[in-house]
Amino acid sequence: MLEEGQESEAAEETASVHAVGVKLGSTRTVVAKPDDGMVRTHEALTCLATYQDVLTGEHRVIYGEEAANEYPERVQFMLRSGLPEDDERAETASTFFNKFSSAIGVPEESVVVYASPGIDNEKGLENLANVIESSGIGNQLVRSYPESLCSAIPALGGGPDAINRIFIGINMGSTNLEACAYRRGEQLASFSTGSVTGNSVDRWIADNVEEETQSRVHIDQTTAREYKEEHGDFVDFEPFTDVIQQPGGGTHEFTIERSVPDALDRYVDNAVNEIANEFLPELASQYIKIYKRTLTEPIVLTGGMACIPGLVEEFEQRLSKELQQEVEVTTPDEPKTAAARGAQQLAAHLVENGLY
């Protein structure tokens, strides 16, 4: 048992250790950390660009939205596949994360929990761990938990109590559709596919725009992603116009009516098919009682695609129809930051209980 003086020292030590949650994502990186007595989230596009300083001749690095907007022709999104798969991407990811974490003031004396994607890629996962561990933060502890678990915590009431639930988590990310049943934090029947992704939607939108405009307009995937994020809506979608520069001078104004809704509709149909006909049968074959239990509990939908207004409700309706039984689907507030916020809550639990 600690004596009074020792207890005071332990309390002071705990108070000086910060609980930090990290989601290093293929499109966007989010860090959640304590700031002025509350937890704040910080976001940046997971990309960087280099340029030469015209005065000094030195090579400089910029990252995030600034890099994407100012150097679109050579900006590097080093985690497009979800993980830093080779040494070059790992080094670029480290440069990005060091710049970002330093800019937002992530303290070295911290316990860091990061959300790990459910991708079967040992080398990529090892590289991701090295990116976090070599960044200079997390001096007290660095630990990973599955992204779909971290993301579900804010939706299930927050805190470690959420882990002691039996539920299905589905992560609709840019590079993968992931699903897993959780039994008090234990992963059961993990499933992942790269055939139904947010990046796929971007490609479909670009193709649809070309078809809808009769090949008069060609957009890149970055523009398609912006269309998806700004105009994607299952409830109140409205046609929108944009303008491009014509070769040889002049501009061309065009209206988009079906390109975005059709791509999103295709995505939900494909996602429901994968969950209903691939993941759930596998879960039922291995854990029939857990399977029956999870369908009576809310299914937690997370990831960037869950931010599309009305998508959660549409997914619930179509999955219920496919399964021929009513299921409930929920999502955390602000799904795109949920993984980092859930990871931060896990880190806070580790700090509060001295588990570092």
Image (cartoon, rainbow, N blue to C red):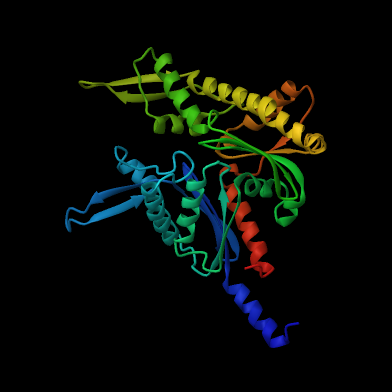
Quick check: 325 left or right of 18? Answer: right
Question: Quadrant where the N terminus lies?
Answer: bottom right
Residue 316 is situated, as x and y percent measured from the top left of the image, at: 70, 29
User: Residue 295: horizontal and vertical position, in percent?
Assistant: 78, 34
Residue most extreme to the top: 214
Q: Residue at x 72, y 51 (%)?
A: 163
Q: Position of residue 44 (x, y in %)?
A: 45, 48
Name the residue nearer the viewer: 340 or 249.
340
Observer-nearest of 122 and 324 = 122
Residue at 69% x, 68% y is 353
Can residue 183 be seen from the camera position used here?
yes
Q: Is residue 325 left or right of residue 32?
A: right
Q: Is residue 207 above or below residue 229?
A: above
Left or right, 260 with respect to 153, comes to left
At x 52% / y 43%, what residue is drawn?
121
Task: Quarter of the image for the C terminus: give it.
Answer: bottom right
Look at the picture and state if 61 lies above or below 78: below
Q: How many marks?
A: 0
Q: Measured from the top left, where is residue 66 in percent x and y?
A: 36, 47
Asked whether, in this view, residue 222 is left or right of residue 270, the answer is left
* Above or below 262: residue 195: below
Rendering quarter of residue 237: top right
Residue at (69% x, 82% y) in the render: 7
Quadrant in which residue 294 is drawn? top right
Residue 328 shows in this picture = no
Q: In the image shown, does 12 or 2 lie closer to the viewer?
A: 2
